[in-house]
Image (tube, rainbow, N blue to C red):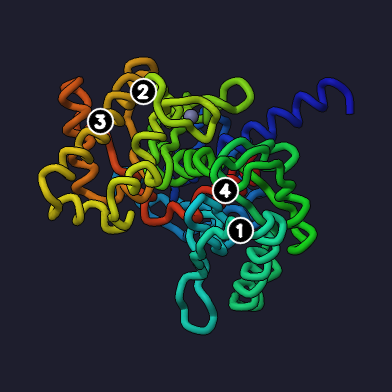
């Protein structure tokens, strides 16, 4: 292909991705709306959407009549076809691993037998060799596939894994999943050998941020600071609609803000990181609350314990407000098991507000994806590849 041809090809791909992104964020929409909003000619919108309908990525939703003003002119709405294809997902964190089969809207597929969502939770087994645990995961996923409708099984395109710590996403390798495994693990090659599928691997919090971009608050907002609490402290920066990864993918390590001189040794090798003070592992040295019940337990515990938790929340809030001062995001988005408690979220926002009155509950929001956080991240990593 000559230079001009390559350029045209690139423009076509960019427009395809632009159109998919717009329909994903605002769909169902008409072709006319896409042309106006995405700044493309009606002819090129028609050409690209026709191709995407042929590929099965988009579907027409029938005819909607405009109001009286346009004298009943027909308007055909188009939207993302959620059932275009499916992805097997695994999200591996230090306490729990969640497996699922998802469509391209990040929703779990229903089992043929009992119509229950194909989602499974298991304890992350750190006593096994990582490769052996990955094979257990693959076996469960294969069983979940056998519970899918037969015609949907041929539309499984990919498996996608979210894992804590540092990841080489190009090679599909976990470089160090602090607290899960402390060595290099070639996740993509083990899983693709077992599942006979291409396998994507991404840091779990970045995957969740990708989900926020595609399915959550990021659909309408360009700049977000995401903070995840439970079991560790994770964070991600969404800048101009994309994840900011920084040098060697190490940006947004809020859990590794140093908050205490000569504090406890952190999994990152330094001392006194925020995570050594407020992670679930740190808190449970003093408390015996289950993460699911943290909010209720907080409300009914004694004064002294409550004061201890409040001081941890205060420390965490200070780090969040400082990060927000640097980044000036449109919103801070809270996610993760501990933030799923309204009581804990309320205490956290109150602590943030005590430092900065603009950090209120209009600025700090709970992620709308919170109930789906075990699988929506890895699903979004697949969808992002699909949309280009
Ligand atoms: Zn650290």
Which residue reaches farthest right?
Answer: 1
Q: Which residue bears the numbered disc 3?
A: 363
Q: Relative to 126, is 171 above or below? A: above
Q: Relative to 165, is 53 above or below? A: below
User: Mark 1 falls on what kind of element?
Assistant: loop
Q: Residues within 10 Å of mark 2 (few under 14, many from 20)?
A: some
Which residue reaches farthest top?
Answer: 326
User: Where does residue 121 sit, x and y in percent of width and height?
Assistant: 49, 65
Q: Nearer the viewer, residue 133 or 57?
A: 133
**2 and 4 marks in contact (CB < 8 Å):** no
User: Mark 4 falls on what kind of element?
Assistant: loop
Kindly tell me whether residue 296 is visible in this rendering: yes
Which callout, 2 or 3, points at the residue further toward the start of the chain?
2
In 3D space, how far apart are the residues under numbered discs 2 and 4 (Cα atoms)?
24 Å
Residue 180: numbered disc: 4
**2 and 1 marks in contact (CB < 8 Å):** no
Q: Residues within 10 Å of mark 4 (few under 14, many from 20)?
A: some
User: Where does residue 168 sit, x and y in percent of width and height?
Assistant: 69, 36
**4 and 3 marks in contact (CB < 8 Å):** no
> Residue sitting at 50 percent across and 55 percent down?
375
Mark 3, mark 1: which one is toward the viewer?
A: 1
Residue 170: numbered disc: none
């Amino acid at each position: 292909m000559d230079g001009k041809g390559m350029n045209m090809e690139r423009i076509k791909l960019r427009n395809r991705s632009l159109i998919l992104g717009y329909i994903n964020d605002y769909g169902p929409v008409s072709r006319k709306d896409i042309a106006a909003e995405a700044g493309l000619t009606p002819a090129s919108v028609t050409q690209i959407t026709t191709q995407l309908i042929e590929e099965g990525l988009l579907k027409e939703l029938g005819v909607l009549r405009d109001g009286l003003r346009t004298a009943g002119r027909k308007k055909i709405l188009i939207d993302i076809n959620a059932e275009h294809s499916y992805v097997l997902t695994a999200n591996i964190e230090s306490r729990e691993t969640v497996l699922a089969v998802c469509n391209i809207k990040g929703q779990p597929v229903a089992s043929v037998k009992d119509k229950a969502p194909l989602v499974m939770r298991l304890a992350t087994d750190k006593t096994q060799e990582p490769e052996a645990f990955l094979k257990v995961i693959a076996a469960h996923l294969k069983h979940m596939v056998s519970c899918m409708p037969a015609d949907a099984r041929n539309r499984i395109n990919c498996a996608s894994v979210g894992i804590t710590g540092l990841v080489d996403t190009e090679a599909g390798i976990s470089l160090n999943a602090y607290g899960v495994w402390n060595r290099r693990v070639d996740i993509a090659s083990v899983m693709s050998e077992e599942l006979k599928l291409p396998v994507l691997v991404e840091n779990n919090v970045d995957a969740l941020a990708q989900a926020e971009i595609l399915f959550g608050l990021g659909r309408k907002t360009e700049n977000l600071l995401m903070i995840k609490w439970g079991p560790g402290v994770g964070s991600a920066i969404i800048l101009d609609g994309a994840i900011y990864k920084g040098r060697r993918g190490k940006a947004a390590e809020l859990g590794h803000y140093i908050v205490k001189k000569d504090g406890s040794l952190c999994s990152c090798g330094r001392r006194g990181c925020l995570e050594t003070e407020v992670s679930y592992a740190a808190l449970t040295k003093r408390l015996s609350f289950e993460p699911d019940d943290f909010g209720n337990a907080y409300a009914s515990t004694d004064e002294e314990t409550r004061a201890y938790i409040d001081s941890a929340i205060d420390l965490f809030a200070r780090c969040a407000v400082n990060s927000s001062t640097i980044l000036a995001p449109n919103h801070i988005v809270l996610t993760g098991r501990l933030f799923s408690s309204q009581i804990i979220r309320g205490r956290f926002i109150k602590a943030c507000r005590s430092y900065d009155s603009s950090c209120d509950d209009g600025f700090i929001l709970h992620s709308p994806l919170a109930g789906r956080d075990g699988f929506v991240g890895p699903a979004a990593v697949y969808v992002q590849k699909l949309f280009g």
